Image (cartoon, rainbow, N blue to C red):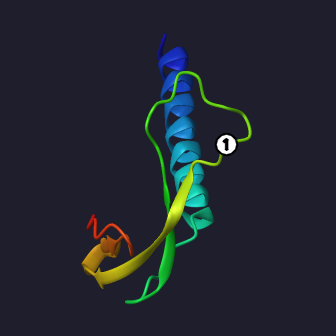
Amino acid sequence: MNELEQIRREAYDNTQLNKERAKIFNHRQINRKVFFSSQKVLLYDSRLHLFLEKLRSRWTSPYIVIQVFLRGAIEINHPTKDNVF
């Protein structure tokens, strides 16, 4: 019984270590984007579309970055419609 508990505990510890290593690896693969004021950016349309056309782009027209906040938040403006997000 003690051997079985010990094997289970080692297996649990090994899975925890593997999860931590995978998490560190995945976080290293994320590319951080740096935005500047008056830079043009495209906005990704992430809404759910049930009947999405295959060749239709989900990126919408270029927006202009107005202000960059801490932690990567940005305020963007549509150049013709004056919509601020």
Q: Nearer the viewer, residue 68 or 40?
A: 40
Q: Is residue 23 visible?
A: yes
The kind of secondary structure element at disc 1 is loop
In the image as oriented, which residue stretches furthest toward the bottom? 37
Direction from residue 50 to residue 78 in the image, left or right = left
Q: How many marks?
A: 1
Direction from residue 24 to residue 74 in the image, left or right = left
Direction from residue 51 to residue 83 in the image, left or right = left
Which x, y percent locates residue 60? 52, 57
**Which residue, given by chain and number where applicable, does mark 1 sit on?**
56
In the image as oriented, which residue stretches furthest toward the top? 1
Q: What residue do we see at 62% from left, 63% from top?
A: 29
Which x, y percent locates residue 82? 28, 70
In the image as oriented, which residue stretches furthest toward the right? 55
At label 1, the amino acid type is Arg
* Quarter of the image where one finds residue 70: bottom left
Q: Nearer the viewer, residue 33 or 20?
A: 33
Q: What residue do we see at 58% from left, 66% from top?
A: 28
Q: Determine whether 59 is above or below 64 in the image.
A: above
Q: Determine whether 41 is above or below 22 in the image.
A: below
